[in-house]
Amino acid sequence: MDDFPEREISGLNIKIDRTMCIGSANCIKVAPDVFELDNERICSFKEKTPGVEKEILVESCSVCPVKALYVIDKEGNQIIP
């Protein structure tokens, strides 16, 4: 599996740094339709991710204790971390 998967969701580019993830699952608590833990207990995208409000995506990425989730807007500006 890719250590740095990316996906565009609701107009935001979301990137996971799987090398940093510690499996706290805080992101899943906020956005359970987007994230899951794989069999290694590392964050990954669910196979299908429905449209999710931008605010929920930003919040779900901001609660990561090790800053393993990145949010980049359409203009290329990094919002999180």
Image: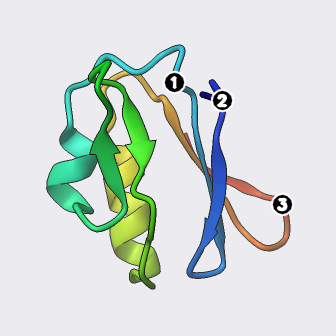
Query: Is residue 63 at all visible to an observer of this figure?
Result: no
| SS at mark 2 in the image | loop
* Distance of label 2 from label 3 (alpha carbons): 22 Å
Question: Residue 69 location, x and y as percent?
Answer: 50, 39
State which quadrant residue 53 falls in: bottom left
* Residue 25 higher or lower than 53, as above or below: above
Q: Which residue is mark 1?
A: 18
| SS at mark 1 in the image | loop
- Tell me what residue is drawn at x 42 percent, y 81 percent: 50
Question: Residue 17 location, x and y as percent?
Answer: 57, 28
- Tell me what residue is drawn at x 39 percent, y 57 percent: 46
For the residues carrying marks 2 and 3, which lies nearer the camera in this image? Answer: 2
* Residue 28 higher or lower than 40, as above or below: below
Is 54 placed left or right of 81 in the picture? left
* Type of amino acid at the residue the image marks with label 1: Arg
Question: Residue 44 location, x and y as percent?
Answer: 43, 41
Question: Residue 77 location, x and y as percent?
Answer: 77, 58
Q: Earlier in the sequence, mark 1 or mark 3?
A: 1
* Distance of label 1 from label 2 (alpha carbons): 8 Å
Q: Contact (CB < 8 A) between labels 1 and 2? A: yes
- Tell me what residue is drawn at x 44 percent, y 70 percent: 48
- Tell me what residue is drawn at x 34 percent, y 59 percent: 59
* Quarter placement of the N terminus: top right
Q: Contact (CB < 8 A) between labels 1 and 3? A: no
Is 16 placed left or right of 37 in the picture? right
Query: Is residue 1 at all visible to an observer of this figure?
Result: yes
**Residue furthest out toward the right:** 75
Label annotation for residue 2: 2
Q: Earlier in the sequence, mark 1 or mark 2?
A: 2
Is 67 placed left or right of 79 in the picture? left
Please tell me how crowded label 3 is: few (under 14), some (14-19), or many (20+) other residues with Cα within 10 Å: few
Q: Which residue is mark 3?
A: 76
